Structures are given as structure tokens and as C-alpha cells.
Image (cartoon, rainbow, N blue to C red):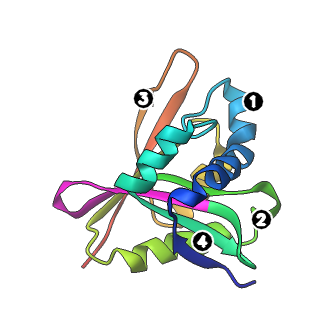
Amino acid sequence: MRIDFELANENDTNKIINVQNQSFYEDYVKYGECPAYNESEQAMFNQIQNASVYKILKDKEIIGDIVIRKRENNNFYLRVISVIPQYQNLGVGQMAIKFIENEFPEASEWELITPFKSYRNHHFYEKMGYVKVEEYRHSAILTMYRYKKKVLS
């Protein structure tokens, strides 16, 4: 399966919101909230302007997205990696992780968060070399796990 990655632009705002809503709907239903579900147009527009937002494309259709923020000391925060349900479990997430690691070779560390009951995510990130480093209360109903991956140079 051929998958492409392209930087998003302002014209992609609503398409990316739609993709994230499809991707995170299950988490939203399970927890009653999800930080990347139902983002406003303004919030997504701001991310496209101020972060690295990539479209995940199959046959020129957006099937997922990646949102990355560079922090200090070449640390990067993987805010979102989403793939719509019909393309999950097909290796797209692995391709996305490999893509960003090649795209940002200066990274010394990657960090991300994921909900505490998202067992499939835990397995995926651990398989990709991430280690759980913290649990914290995001809200009264949602606990998040923080994962990090150190990059050896």
C-alpha cells in the first residue's frame, strides 16, 4: 500500500478535523472526552500555522494526520497521530512514525500522551520504541500515560 505524507495548509483545516474526529470517536465515546476530538477550526488553523502538521494520504485522500511541536533541546512532542478506522492495523501508523523520525533527524527525544485504557496504542508505541514514563490525571474522568523515546545518535 502506497502512503504519502505532505505538509498541511490552511485549506486542509476542516478535512483534518474530520479525520481526527473519525479517528478519535471511539476514545471520545469511551471516556466522554478526548483532547484531539472535535477541535475548533481556529485551533486546527493555529496548529497548521504554528506546528508541523502532516497529512497522511492514500490515493491523494487524507486518511490521517500527524501534529508535531518542536520543543527546546531538540525534543519533539507528537501531539497527534491519527488514522481513520478503515486504515488502522495496516501498518500506516508504523510508516508515520518512521516518516517523522526521518523527517526530524535532529530529534534527541520524542514525547506523546495517550489515554490509559487505549491498550492498542500502548502496544503500538512500545513496539515503536516508546517507554511509559508517567501517568497523570488529565481531568476528573481521564488519566493519560506519557511516553518518551530517546533517540540515539
Labelled disc at residue 136: 3
Q: Magenta stretch: give its range.
A: 65-76
Q: Amino acid at mark 2?
A: Tyr
The picture places residue 75, in percent across and down from the top left corner, at 26, 59
Residue 35 picture location, percent across and down? 54, 35
Was residue 75 drawn as part of the magenta stretch in this picture? Answer: yes
Q: Residue furthest right?
A: 86
Dot 4 falls on a residue whose secondary structure is helix
Q: Is residue 53 magenta?
A: no
Placement of the N terminus among the 4 image quadrants: bottom right
Which residue is rendered at x = 62% and y = 69% of the image? 56
Is residue 3 in view from this perspective? yes
Earlier along the polypeptide chain: callout 3 or callout 4?
4
Q: Amino acid at mark 3?
A: Tyr
User: Which residue, given by chain and number where applicable, does mark 1 sit on?
Assistant: 29
Q: Earlier along the polypeptide chain: callout 4 or callout 2?
A: 2
- Residue at 25% x, 74% y is 106
CA–CA distance in space, label 1 to label 2: 20 Å
In this view of the protein, which residue sits in the foreground, 28 or 108? 28
Q: Is residue 77 visible?
A: no
In the rendering, which numbered label is found on residue 94? Answer: 4
Q: Is residue 111 left or right of residue 14?
A: left
